[in-house]
Image (tube, rainbow, N blue to C red):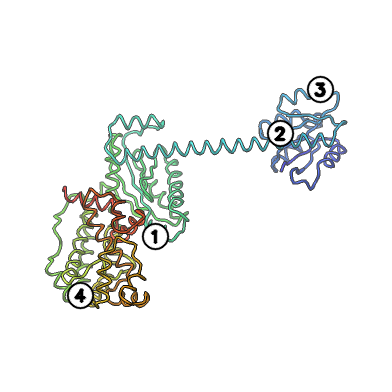
Amino acid sequence: MLRILIVDDEILVRIGLKTIIPRDNEDFQVIGEAANGLEALKILESQACDVVLTDIRMPEMDGLELLKQIRERWPAIKCLILSNHNDFNYVQQALRLGAIEYVTKLEINPSELMEKLGAIRDQLQLEKQGQNARTQLEQKVNQYSNEVKEKRLRELLQGHVSRGEIEQVWREFQLELFTSPLSAAVIQIDSYEELTQNNRFQSDRLLTYTVKNVLNEILKKYGNGELVEMAVGKFCVLTGQINANMLVEMQNAVQVFLKISLAIGVSPSYEDTFALHQAYEKADHALSYRFYYGGSCIVYYDHLHVSLPTLSEPWQEEEWMKRIEEGDEIGLREKIAAWTEELCHNKNIPPALLREQWLGLLHIFARCLKAEGGDIYSVTLHEQQYPYHVIRNAETLQALSNWFIGWLPVFLAYKREHGKEKLRPEIQMVIRQIMEKYNLPLKVADLANNVGYTENYLSILFKKETGKTITDYITNVRMKNARELLKNPDYKIFEISELIGYADPNHFSRSFKQMEGMYPTEFRKLIFGHRTS
């Protein structure tokens, strides 16, 4: 709709123009009328307008001065001049000031006026389309440029690169070099998986984008710096000397506006402003100590006790196995609680190595089951989580310890019920079929038909006998084979996916992470890392 303002000191002219422009027309709307330029400006300051129909000679402020004001303040507005026969010189000045057309007041032809207004409307639509296209193109160019810059900075932070490569990136994106010293802070959104599962932000990208915007605004407030998204929910701030107030303000702002907490790790200061990778690694290591400190913490690398302690297991395996065999839930719980308390007090074991110790403890439980023909992956889930996933992904030591203590009675109950237990022949037959055909699209209905049971009855009986649903049992068998295949570097991930019965490699990767706490590619790196160490 074309919004029109009529400006003329003659009331009859204003009435005539309003009569020509139909009220109920969806394409045109008269938003107001004014007797001079001053009145017109007041209306333009309060209402959106597309076209001004204005006389030239008016009291207080004439049409030429009004045109100057409009060109300076609202350059997108089109102006159409209402003139008399003897106003030719004024019309010429008006056209030079940006008026696009003129009509003679005494000879106004309604159809001609509407035709001119229609042409203006079409011109504005074309300009708007062109502006939208330019805006979209500029946004795409800016977005692409920002994405490329962030990708290059991420590469500098994650790998050892030469000073020349760093200087090239700085020149390429016209970045301002940091003044000595250089510092890095790595920021992680606490409880990221829980936030995305609760769907508070509709999507992972929206959550990350929102937090990133808040962090950027605060970073700008404190001066020179770069914010780089390192992974989903994880960022790195590169700046000069880290300002502690800035980090606290970042935490407070995200907490107040988004109800989200942040954990932050801070690197030492480097006199060498090209030490980007070193600064990032130290900050990321400091961040890992939120495992001890919990969420919403700020951990400085310089404050850590980074000397490695003796990393022998803090237990006698025979004692643990004895308590497990005896079903001593209270004794096991007390040992885990005491060990956790000691760890939280000392905080001297790097979290990555401490997780390995917890995995070592879990292996003791697994061996006790395996001796009886059982499988740790078949134990009933506690809080819908597999133990390997919890150990590798728990954000804090206390959360890991609490989960493990809660899992103990579940494990012991499963061991009592299924240890050294002989399954019914029909269930053994189903298990054999799963073992032989796990790489095929197995259906419960087909398995039930092979043993002469209904699908529903077999499902109930299988769960009662094994403690697992048939679907979960199939998944466990497939993942067990996947773990073995991942030890062979000749197989690609998508090939392993097909070999164990998954048509979609992404589905395989998600299922593997749910059970193991890491993706297949990460598991493979872990395996080969251990072999070479």
The residue that disc 1 covers is 194
- Tell me where residue 53 appears, x and y as whole percent: 77, 35
The residue that disc 4 covers is 419
Q: Determine which quarter of the picture holds residue 428.
A: bottom left
Query: Is disc 3 in contact with disc 1, using a CB cutoff of under 8 Å?
Result: no
Q: Amino acid at mark 3?
A: Phe
Mark closer to the observer (1, 4): 4
Among the two numbered marks 3 and 1 on one chain, the one whose residue lies closer to the N terminus: 3
In terms of secondary structure, where does tag 2 sit?
strand
Q: Determine which quarter of the picture holds residue 386.
A: bottom left
Work out whether 466 lies above or below 345.
below
Question: Could you give the CA–CA distance between mark 3 and mark 2, rounded to whole angstroms?
Answer: 20 Å
Q: Is residue 242 left or right of residue 72?
A: left
Among the two numbered marks 3 and 2 on one chain, the one whose residue lies closer to the N terminus: 2
The residue that disc 3 covers is 88
The residue that disc 2 covers is 78
Query: Is disc 1 in contact with disc 4, using a CB cutoff of under 8 Å?
Result: no
- Label 4 crowding class (10 Å Cα cut-off): few <14, some 14-19, many 20+? some
In terms of secondary structure, where does tag 3 sit?
helix
Q: Nearer the viewer, residue 280 or 131?
A: 131
